[in-house]
């Protein structure tokens, strides 16, 4: 006897692509059976362009189409506040679980609706009882754009241990639904008694055995589904990877997504491009990329600024921009609300910001975390330092004032060294800015040597 887990995560802006949503739903449906549990591990209601218009409800037809059984929340599920995600939870077919969110103290303001979700559940399939616990990243109150700042998130490792102590005598298998960064994901996998960790949050795939525990992660945007078979007895779990691009398409799901996009005027063609603009994470986080240049140029254009800086963690993967490109496809490149902001900084402050963009990332090895416009930057990768910065081909002047365009996240986040005392001019949201720029200026962007390694 065996139980099969069908695992998706971090759908995000796949909800803006009818083909991807149809293929994702079709792939899951093709491997669904009476012995399956369909499980999601967060960030499946946001971010994305439709998400801004629907506040996460655009995901409901997908949840129903694939008959999701169990899910945990992710940081982006709070993008529009606590109330919208609670509405989605109340209307979706699956049971939502999260064990490491608490009410906190009486002054925290944490919504009891999230804290009162069950942390665990037990499902019966093919003669086996499978226990599930959901845990989210402790950084969620800091990294969720708006809706999670008042959540109290405790240790995922301790929450998993507590759940195991409560369920270990009654279940045959124990599975963690983990919306965690990689080191926490590894730590919960090392807890004695965990059979499988279904991961999310990090946008790179994972298939690994950690201390005898199977860990799988599908990456982002509905491109991969994992099928995990849990066997009765001592036989270890087995994982099969399914590429949704190679799977069948659920035409009904694709049509539903098209209707959702049409309802908010996102199917309009705004530009054409002959040379496809690729959006994969390796291209845009290892140095200069066309898609990064495109977004940075759009910010500078919108704010009429000297320079622009874009945190490339806010850019999202998807199919290449090719041929006739719609407003929805353009907006999905940088699908966040907030604002494009313009402020004045000194040359020294600008250099400090650029220096902060060069740092290794613990989860995916990224080196370069920013995209730029109006500047040329040289960086010594071996020494780990900036060599030179020029603005409009002129060496940067320490005391000179420059007008810089960037996002609300960069301006107001503690992660970036932006002076808080500076007056800020606000423009449209990033997702609309990028679409408007393509409509007005076209998509002729190239890699032009603005970021150079030496």
Image: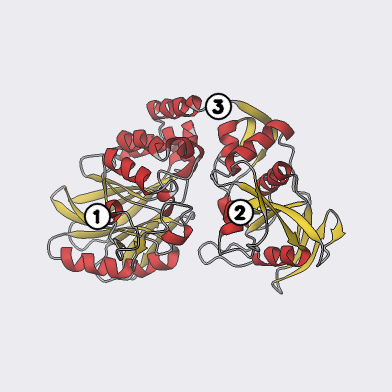
Q: Nearer the viewer, residue 343 or 217?
A: 343
Q: Earlier in the sequence, mark 1 or mark 3?
A: 1
Residue 45 vertical position relative to residue 160 in the rendered view, above or below: above
Which image quarter is the C terminus in?
Answer: bottom right
Q: Which residue is mark 3?
A: 267
Tell me where residue 381 appears, x and y as whole percent: 70, 68
Alpha carbon distance from label 1 to label 3: 39 Å
Asked if residue 369 lies left or right of residue 63, the reply is right
Number of the label disc, if any, that sits on residue 179: none
Residue in view at x 56 percent, y 51 percent: 314
Tell me where residue 302 appears, x and y as whole percent: 70, 42
Q: Nearer the viewer, residue 372 or 343?
A: 343
Q: Which residue is mark 2?
A: 312
Q: Which residue is mark 1?
A: 116
> In this view of the protein, can residue 453 be seen by the observer?
no
Residue 278 vertical position relative to residue 400 in the rendered view, above or below: above
Circle nearer the viewer, 1 or 2: 1
Residue in view at x 36 percent, y 68 percent: 210
Asked if residue 211 lies left or right of residue 247, the reply is left
């Amino acid at each position: 006897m065996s139980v099969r887990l069908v695992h998706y995560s971090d759908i995000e802006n796949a909800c803006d692509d009818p083909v991807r949503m149809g293929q994702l739903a079709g792939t899951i449906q093709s491997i669904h059976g009476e012995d399956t549990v369909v499980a999601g591990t967060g960030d499946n209601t946001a971010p994305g362009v439709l998400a801004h218009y629907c506040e996460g409800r655009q995901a409901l037809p997908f949840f129903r189409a694939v008959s999701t059984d169990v899910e945990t929340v992710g940081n982006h599920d709070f993008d529009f506040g606590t109330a919208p995600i609670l509405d989605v939870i109340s209307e979706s077919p699956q049971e939502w679980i999260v064990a490491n969110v608490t009410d906190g103290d009486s002054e925290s303001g944490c919504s009891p609706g999230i804290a009162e979700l069950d942390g665990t559940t037990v499902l019966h399939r093919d003669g086996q009882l499978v226990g599930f616990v959901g845990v989210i990243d402790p950084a969620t109150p800091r990294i969720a754009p708006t809706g999670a700042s008042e959540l109290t998130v405790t240790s995922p490792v301790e929450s998993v241990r507590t759940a195991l102590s409560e369920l270990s005598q009654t279940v045959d298998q124990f599975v963690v639904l983990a919306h965690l960064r990689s080191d926490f994901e590894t730590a919960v996998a090392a807890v004695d008694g965990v059979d499988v960790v279904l991961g999310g949050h990090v946008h790179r795939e994972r298939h690994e055995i950690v201390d005898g525990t199977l860990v799988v992660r599908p990456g982002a945007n509905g491109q991969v589904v994992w099928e995990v078979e849990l066997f009765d007895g001592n036989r270890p779990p087995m994982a099969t990877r399914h590429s949704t691009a190679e799977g069948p398409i659920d035409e009904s799901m694709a049509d539903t997504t098209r209707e959702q996009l049409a309802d908010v005027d996102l199917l309009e063609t705004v530009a054409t491009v002959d040379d496809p603009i690729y959006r994969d994470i390796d291209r845009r986080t290892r140095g200069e990329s066309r898609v990064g240049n495109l977004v940075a140029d759009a910010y500078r254009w919108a704010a009429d600024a000297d320079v622009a800086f874009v945190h490339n963690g806010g850019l999202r993967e998807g199919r290449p921009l090719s041929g006739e490109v719609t407003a929805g496809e353009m907006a999905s490149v940088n699908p966040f609300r907030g604002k494009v902001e313009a402020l004045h900084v000194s040359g020294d402050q600008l250099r400090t910001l650029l220096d902060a963009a060069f740092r290794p990332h613990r989860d995916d090895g990224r080196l370069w975390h920013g995209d730029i416009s109006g500047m040329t930057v040289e960086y010594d990768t071996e020494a780990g330092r900036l060599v030179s910065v020029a603005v409009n081909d002129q060496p940067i002047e320490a005391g000179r004032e420059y007008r810089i365009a960037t996002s609300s996240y960069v301006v107001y986040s503690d992660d970036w060294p932006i002076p808080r005392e500076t007056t800020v001019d606000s423009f449209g949201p990033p997702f609309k800015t990028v679409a408007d720029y393509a409509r007005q200026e076209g998509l002729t962007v190239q890699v032009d040597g603005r970021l150079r390694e030496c």
